[in-house]
Amino acid sequence: MKEPDAVKTSSGEWHPRHSPWLIAFAVMISTFMEVLDTSVANVALPHIAGNLSASQHEATWVLTSYLVANAIVLPATAWFGGFFGRKRFLMVCIVIFTVSSALCGLASSLGMLITARVIQGFGGGALQPISQAVLLESFPKEKRGVAMSVFALGVIVAPIVGPTVGGWITDCYSWRWIFLINLPVGILAVVLSKIYVEDPPYIKKNKATEIDFTGFSLMAVGLGTLQIVLDKGQEVDWFAASWICWSTILIVVSLTAFVFWELNTKNPVVNFRILKDVNFSTGTVIVTILGVVLYSTTALLPLYLQSLMGYTAYLSGLALSPRGISAFLTAAIIGRLLGLIDGRIFVAGGLALLGVTCYAMGDINLEIGIMNVIWPVVGTGIGISAIFVSLTTLTMGTLHREDIGNATGIFNLMRNIGGSFGIAIMTTLLARMSQVHQAILVSHLTPYDPMYQETFRMFQGMIAQAGNAASPVLAYGMIYQELLRQSMLMAFVDNFRWMGILCLFCIPMAFLFRKVHLSKDAPIAAH
């Protein structure tokens, strides 16, 4: 039986046959599953290493391999969708992701697990930009804010709840189930995508006919090497390692050649010409910074709670869960209000709130209770969600529909690269600044400092009460351990405050956007 034709409005604008909410559910369950897998394995690494007889250092390749493959596919998603057909490509990617998830869960060695994670990364890389493009095209223009609030639930909430979910599954069952649980979700996503998702007319008419092997190869080498350097640089002290130096040269050469080639080839893998659009280029810069803050705080807070406050991995993930709840609620509210209030106000207000709450995290100490962590966490969730929903709508609002698929690939890539840069920079600053503070604090450890003398006597008294001889050596050791904790705490304080300042400095950028009219009568692109 022949399927009914897609709906067109009186102005000739294309609309899908099915309800946009059914389409949203079809594409977002696979996207949520994919984004969850970028962070769900973090807390399970010690279990994976022990079970597969590998070191902790070797086990980190389970994360790195996925991110490398993911980064390579992200910007090329629009081209693959144009070459194979976007619906067909989406379904194939879900199948690849699901099958490789099963292989991850069944892996009998670290090599097999890393290979499966690479395949999983290739399959999952396209899911975010495709789902974002499908949502923007399926919902009418006046409801794009609602569409992006649905998308935000996947790309913002999933990384936040990932460590909590991963910790719970690992503790209660096995690390293998964090991958095997994807099987029923993946099967459902394929079935729903087959039924509800469809290609718009411009994709059917303008299919790519040539494969840009040169562009894709340069992109794969540059982005893959960049991801490895960012992930492993701190472990080898960055440019102190010769392979980091050579890799950096390779990154600069390959990515420069890639941009030059793409700007001069007839059928580019990534169309950089859309960066001429003011809204898109501004939004790409802001989402990169948002990625820095989102992924850095997600990495730093659990580290602070576990290393200095004695929380377990599961409890530290649970402490972050209110951010997911506040982000979820905020996304739903902002999506409804975007048609009534200028989105630039939400971006500026979200950056201000995010900056203030990140700076407030700089008030942490070694005596705080859980509520002192939860309230700033809730604030960051509200700020990030307010920024992301309105930012995505503004960024894509002045583009033609034919450019949205390519734009979503670049947009999501830059958010992920921002996250990788953020984690690399913040972990480096954490190590460096803790050494700086340690050098400053140790200058006070002299017999002539009254505070030092008082602390020394206190520790000697504690040792004596424990039934040991009041040994000065033990007291010195306890003082030094406390010095290390305090210097690490000060480094965390520095990081949170730097992120807060970064957000506050970005507020003026919100007003570089051209206003986007989300109304039925507004044109598709307000150039």
Image: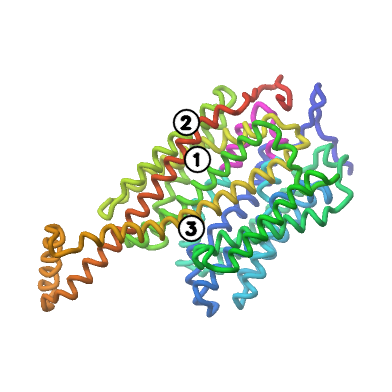
Q: Residue at x 72, y 53 (%)?
A: 190
Q: Residue at x 67, y 70 (%)?
A: 115
Q: How many residues crowd around disc 2 within 10 Å: few (fewer than 14), some, or many (20 or more)?
A: some
Toward the viewer: 302 or 93?
302
**Is residue 279 covered in magenta?**
no
* Residue hosting label 3: 163
Extreme-bottom residue of the structure: 53
Q: Earlier in the sequence, mark 2 or mark 1?
A: 2
Q: Name the side, left or right, on which 113 lies relative to 363.
A: right
Q: Position of residue 392 (x, y in %)?
A: 61, 36
Q: Nearer the viewer, mark 2 or mark 3?
A: 2
Image quadrant assignment for residue 63: bottom right
- Magenta span: predominant SS is helix
Tell me which amino acid carries mark 2.
Answer: Gly
Tell me which amino acid carries mark 3.
Answer: Pro
* Residue hosting label 2: 349
Q: Name the side, left or right, on which 121 lies relative to 201.
A: left
Q: Position of residue 298 (x, y in %)?
A: 47, 52
Range covered by the magenta-colored residues: 135-152
Q: Residue at x 41, y 53 (%)?
A: 301
Q: Is residue 433 visible?
A: yes
Kindly report the distance in space between the C-alpha atoms of the residues bearing marks 2 and 3: 28 Å
Image quadrant assignment for residue 353: top left
Q: Secondary structure at mark 2?
A: helix
**Is residue 136 covered in magenta?**
yes
Q: Position of residue 302 (x, y in %)?
A: 41, 57
Compared with 46, 187 (above or below) is above
Tell me which amino acid carries mark 1.
Answer: Ile
Compared with 473, 102 (above or below) is above
* Residue hosting label 1: 384
Q: Name the side, left or right, on which 108 lies relative to 447.
A: right
Toward the viewer: 270 or 353?
270
